[in-house]
Structures are given as C-alpha cells and as structure tokens.
C-alpha cells in the first residue's frame, strides 16, 4: 500500500512542467536516435549526459530514462519500413517485421511493435516498482565484501553475456578499470599513472571516456565507410494499424512469455535490451507454437523481440536503483548522471530520496504511454529525419561531444582526451573489442576498488572472506555460473540442439 | 594466411607489452606504507594481471585454433546471414582526415573561439565526409553554430572558449546580437 501511495506522489511530482518537458524531450530525442542508424541508444544517452550538469537530478534522470526507453522502440520503424535497423536491438525486427512489411502490411507490423513495446514496458515497470524496494531493503545487509562481489557480478556479466571473444571483453574491462585508477589514490594520496600531469592527478572523468568511446568512436567508424548509408525509398503513407483485441488475445501467452524473458534478462546485470531482443526471438523460434513460420513475417516474430527489449528497461533499472549496479551501457550512463549530482544509487537512495526514485518510476509509466502516442501520431515526421545527410548529423554529434568535453573543467585537455578516447573506441570496435565493458570498468572501477580495499582493511587482507560469507559466497557462485554461460551454451548446442533454420526472406 | 595470423596476434602482443610495462610502473608508486595494508598499486595490478592473462589466453587460442574469431553468447541467437565485413569499402584517408580535423579543432578553438572554430569545423567535417552540397554545408554549419551558441553560451552559460584577439570580436558580436 505504501508503495502505491509513494507512486501516486511520484506521478504528481512527475507532472511538474520541467519534468514533463524533460520527459517529452527525452522521448522525442530517444525515438530520433532509434530511427537514425548512425546513432546508437547508448551513444545518444551518453551525449545528453553533459547537458544534465546544471539540471535538477530528478529532471536529468527522467530525461535519460525517457531516452533509454524510447530508444528501444524508435529503431523498429526503420527496420520495418526500410530494412535499416536503427539499433542492434532491432536486428530481429528485420526477420519478421520487415518481411511482414514486404507482404504489404507495414502498418500492421508497426501496430504490433507499438502494442508489444507498450505492453512489455508497462509490465516491466510494474515489476520494477514491486521489486526495487524489497531488493534495496535486502541490500541494506550488505557490507563491503558483499558490495565488492555484487559490483564484480555486474562487471563480469557484461563480459560474459555479450558478443565476440570473452578474452577481448576481459581486456576491455581491464583497460576501463585501469583508466579509472589514473589519478590520486584515495587511501594514500599517491599519484598513479599521472605522467607528471597535474590534470591527470585529478583523474580522468568517466564522462570523457563514455562520450569519446561511444560518440566520437562511432562517428569515426561511420566516417571510415564514407557515411555510406544506402539512400532510402520514399514511403508515402507510413502509419500504424493497431491489431484487434481478438488478434491480441491469440498471442497473449507468447507476449507474456517474451515480456517476462525481457524483464528477467534486464534484471541480470550486464544483459541489456539487445540480448533480451535476440534471446526472446530465439526462444520463440525454438519453442514457440509457430516456430516453423518464424522469419516469414508473423506477429510472433515482432512481438517477441520488441516486448522483451522494452521490458528489459524496467529490469535494468531495478538493480541500478536498488544496488547501484548498472546492467548495460545505457544504465551505466544513467548511473553517471546520478554520480554527477553527487548521488550514489543504492539502498540508501530509497531511504534518503524516495521521492526522487518514485518520480523516476512514474516517469517510466508516463513515458511509455507518451512514447506510444508520439510513435503512433508522429511516425512520418520521425522517419523524415532519415532525409538528413549522415555527414551533417555526424558533424553535429561531434560538436555535442566537444561541448560535453569543454563543459567538464573548461579545459582543452579534456577535448584532447575525448578525441583520444574516440580513437580508442574506434580502434576497439575495429578490432572487435566490445566498448561496453570498457565504459563499465571506468564507472564501476572506483566503486569496486573502494569496496575491495575496505574489505582488505576490515578483514586483515583475508580474501577468502568473499567466499565464506553467505551472501557474498552466493553471489560469487552466481557470478561463476554467468561466466560459464557461454561454455554451457556451447556444450548444449554441441550435444542437444540442431542447427537453427535461417529466416526466410 | 600467415600474415593474417600475425596481424590478428598483434593487438594481444601489444596488450601484453603494455600490461608488463604498467605492472612494473604500478610497483613504483610513491607512498608511505601503513602497516600491512595493501599499497596503491594493488588494485591496478589486479586489473593488469587480468589484462595480461586475457592477452596470453587469446594469443594461445588463436595460435592453436588457427586464428578463428571467438563467438560470444549472443551470436547463437543471430539469424541474420553475415556478409563479408570487408565488402563495405573502407576509406582510411577519410578516417585520418577526420582525426586530423578534430586535432586541428582542439588546437584552434582556444584561439578562434567556440563560435568561429565550430562553424569552420562543421563545414570542414562535412567536406571530409564526402558531402558536396555547398549550400546545405554552409547553411547547416551556420545554423548548428547559432543554435549551439545560443543554447550553451547564452542560455546554459557553459564556459566555452571565446578566442583571442582579433577572433574574440566574433564572440562579442554573437553576444551583442539582440533577439538571439
């Protein structure tokens, strides 16, 4: 009951003009980012981060969360209409969404996307409200060993559940942790890797790494191809046709299954919307009622990835708010926004700033409804943004990155750093080293170090404490399971699974 | 084939060399020890060890497994047929041009000021990006510069470089324009 009252207060607080303005701006910008193939969801959220410096913390989190949630939806428009996935999340949307569009039902495909995003998002928002407070209360029992292993869990799950080589992800994470250790050591005041520079003695701002690696790095990756996005066909009547209640009733079971899968994946630190989208589609293709027809343009192939992707947002916000552990690149940026305002999310936030937390919860509910309304009525102007030449959009993105760098300490050195991290991000992408573990390493590195050093001080350098205490031991066991997931998956596929049929096109 | 293998091993060899160098460096931080507490190098050294171990593992794996790229958890769910990534043309000159241009911006912006520097950078970057509609290039550069200038210099009061004489006059003129 208390939760419902607090949520009601959250709705009232969310409806202040500034919060509503941020909500609308966040949704529109998130949808545009989703539509534009050159801009990714995390990059967009990272680009907005420097501009939240002077904003109220609640308004800034409302803005970033709105961008995050609508970014999981906007890319579906271009995937269905033009076969351009605006985001990696939207790749599964090509298999059935685009195919349904080619069969002459693009409006219907867009309708299924809207309903799935709204339903999946609302379901996950309810789960988020229900789970955050109990989890935060449980987390109050945590001491430094537990906190260290939970941060480690977050870091290692990003490494384990991703794309490409596990070793590359480990290297990327290590580089991130090393970058975060540059500067003055918090216990001894010793200078670490500062090269004698007074500016480096202050450390490297995570914002510089984040905006550089995601923003500048991705623009460089696009520039290298000569901004070669194929010209799109003109769509004269892009609109959304909602499915009937009867049609929705026929797929309610699989919708619920996909949304739950998305929510559970979101709850796992490290696994974001992209993984949710792929896994939900994979489950439907493997075990669904119409598994043989997946890839031929059926509603199930649209509902599964979209419901799961949007549902993952609520799940990801649970451990961000309750434990202070970001589960994905986007939530890492949102954690960064909290930290810019001197707030460390975690169990204490629900006690000290419950009003803010419930306003963020309410903004997710309102944001989902607004997102679908804007998506329904403004689809044509939204996809019109694809008419902008990529070179123009990229130049603008770079300027936003530079302004972000210059506004941190008013120092041109940060501009050089952002360019340097942009080149590093580009190099990582080119050599197939994932960027997300790098960014998470930079953000979580200092938190992990503090918890690790406190544990070593409190327990006289006894590292076995991480395994012998019940809660931390259990989390270590979970971490080991997550780390072994790719191997378990490989073993399963080798012994039990037949090769998946390729989608019809 | 041999060249391809060497090329793919190179990042891990470089990573290993960096790890060794940093490990040595982390042992040389100056500090006053406190009892048997771990020193300031302990935490970075853990990260360096992890990095070195990952580099060694990947080197070994590539040599033994014949340079095959490892696949992660998510690829199993991917049903998109993968085309040869090299099929998309790569323009190294554009990339270098872009990086050099950003470097020039970083050097020039304290002198030219944010307004003039940004305007010139935007136009130059679009040309580097092989866009050739001159009217759009100069128009968009001017529009974006004005929007950013108004938003960040006049509304948000972000402290951006004003430039040195005579270029600071442009910033002054920008601040003096009524209605902006």
Image (cartoon, coloured by chain):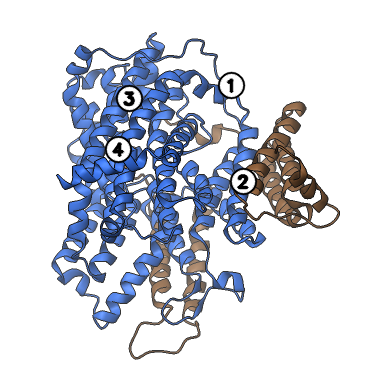
Q: Are marks 2 and 1 in contact (CB under 8 Å)?
A: no
Co-location on one chain, circles 4 and 2: no
Figure chain in brown = B
Residue with the most extreme top position: A104
Query: Neighbour class for label 1 at 10 Å: few (<14), some, many (≥20)?
Result: few
Disc 1 element:
loop
Mark toward the viewer: 4 or 3: 4
Mark toward the viewer: 3 or 2: 2
Residue displayed at 38% across by 13% down: A107
Image location of residue A373, percent across then percent down? 38, 23
Q: Earlier in the sequence, mark 1 or mark 3?
A: 1
Locate the N terminus of chain A and report the quarter of the image it occupies.
top left
- The residue under label 4 is A276
Q: Are marks 1 and 3 in contact (CB under 8 Å)?
A: no
Image location of residue A263, percent across then percent down? 24, 39
Query: To which quarter of the image does residue A98 belong?
Result: top left
Locate the C terminus of chain A and report the quarter of the image it occupies.
top left
**Side (left or right) of A497 relative to A399:** left
Co-location on one chain, circles 1 and 4: yes
Mark toward the viewer: 2 or 1: 2
Query: To which quarter of the image does residue A420 belong?
Result: bottom right
Disc 4 element:
helix
Residue with the most extreme right position: B166
Rounded to the nearest whole Å, what is the CA distance between mark 2 and mark 1?
Answer: 37 Å
- The residue under label 1 is A231
- The residue under label 3 is A502
The answer for which chain carries disc 4 is A
The answer for which chain carries disc 2 is B
């Amino acid at each position: 009951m208390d939760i419902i009252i607090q949520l009601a207060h959250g709705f009232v607080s969310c409806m202040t003009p500034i919060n509503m303005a941020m909500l609308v701006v966040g949704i529109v910008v998130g949808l545009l980012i989703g539509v534009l193939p050159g801009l990714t969801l995390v990059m967009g959220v990272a680009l907005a981060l420097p501009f939240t410096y002077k904003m109220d913390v609640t308004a800034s989190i409302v803005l970033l969360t709105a961008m995050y949630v609508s970014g999981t939806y906007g890319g579906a428009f271009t995937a269905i209409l033009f076969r351009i996935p605006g985001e990696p999340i939207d790749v599964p949307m090509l298999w059935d969404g685009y195919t349904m569009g080619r069969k002459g039902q693009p409006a219907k495909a867009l309708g299924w996307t809207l309903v799935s995003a709204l339903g999946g998002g609302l379901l996950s928002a309810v789960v988020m409200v229900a789970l955050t407070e109990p989890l935060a209360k449980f987390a109050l029992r945590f001491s430094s060993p537990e906190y260290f292993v939970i941060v480690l869990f977050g870091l290692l799950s990003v490494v384990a559940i991703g794309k490409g080589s596990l070793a590359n992800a480990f290297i990327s994470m290590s580089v991130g942790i090393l970058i975060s250790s540059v500067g003055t050591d918090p216990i001894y005041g010793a200078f670490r890797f500062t090269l004698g520079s007074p500016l480096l003695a202050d450390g490297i701002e995570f914002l510089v790494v984040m905006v550089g690696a995601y923003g500048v790095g991705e623009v460089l990756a696009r520039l290298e191809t000569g901004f070669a996005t194929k010209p799109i066909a003109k769509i004269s009547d892009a609109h959304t046709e909602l499915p009937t209640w009867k049609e929705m009733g026929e797929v309610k079971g699989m919708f619920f299954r996909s949304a739950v899968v998305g929510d559970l994946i979101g709850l796992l630190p490290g696994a974001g919307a992209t993984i949710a989208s792929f896994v939900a589609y994979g489950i439907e293709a493997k075990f669904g009622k119409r598994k043989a027809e997946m890839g031929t343009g059926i509603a199930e192939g649209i509902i599964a990835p979209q419901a799961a992707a949007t549902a993952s947002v609520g799940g990801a916000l649970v451990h961000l708010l309750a434990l202070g552990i970001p589960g994905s690149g986007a939530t890492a940026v949102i954690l960064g926004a909290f930290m810019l305002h001197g707030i460390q999310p975690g169990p204490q936030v629900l006690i000290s700033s419950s009003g803010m937390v419930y306003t963020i919860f309410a903004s997710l509910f309102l944001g989902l409804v607004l997102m679908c309304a804007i998506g329904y009525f403004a689809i044509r102007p939204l996809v019109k943004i694809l008419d902008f030449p990529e070179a123009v959009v990229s130049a603008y993105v770079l300027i936003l990155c530079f302004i972000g760098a210059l506004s941190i300490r008013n120092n041109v050195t940060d501009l050089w750093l952002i360019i340097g991290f942009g080149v590093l991000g580009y190099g990582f992408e080119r050599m197939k080293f994932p960027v997300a573990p790098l960014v998470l390493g930079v953000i979580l590195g200092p938190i992990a170090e503090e918890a690790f050093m406190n544990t070593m001080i409190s327990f006289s350098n006894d590292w076995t404490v991480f395994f012998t205490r019940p809660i931390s031991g259990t989390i270590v066991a979970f971490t080991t399971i997550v780390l072994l997931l790719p191997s378990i998956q490989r073993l399963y596929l080798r012994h039990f699974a037949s090769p998946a049929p390729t989608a019809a096109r | 084939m041999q060249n391809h293998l060497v090329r793919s091993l190179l990042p891990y060899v470089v990573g290993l060399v960096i790890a060794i160098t940093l490990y040595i460096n982390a042992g040389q931080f100056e500090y006053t020890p406190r009892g048997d507490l771990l020193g300031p190098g302990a935490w970075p050294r853990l990260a360096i060890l992890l990095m070195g171990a990952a580099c060694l593992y990947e080197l070994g794996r590539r040599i033994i497994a014949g340079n095959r790229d490892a696949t992660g958890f998510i690829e199993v769910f991917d049903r998109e047929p993968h085309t040869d990534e090299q099929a998309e043309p790569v323009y190294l000159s554009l990339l270098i041009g872009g990086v050099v241009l950003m470097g020039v911006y970083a050097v020039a912006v304290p002198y030219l000021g944010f307004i003039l520097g940004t305007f010139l950078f935007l136009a130059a970057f679009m040309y580097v990006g092989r866009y050739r509609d001159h009217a759009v290039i100069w128009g968009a550069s001017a529009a974006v510069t004005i929007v950013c200038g108004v938003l960040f210099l006049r509304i948000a009061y972000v402290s951006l470089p004003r430039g040195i004489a005579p270029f600071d006059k442009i910033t002054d003129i920008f601040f003096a324009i009524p209605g902006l």
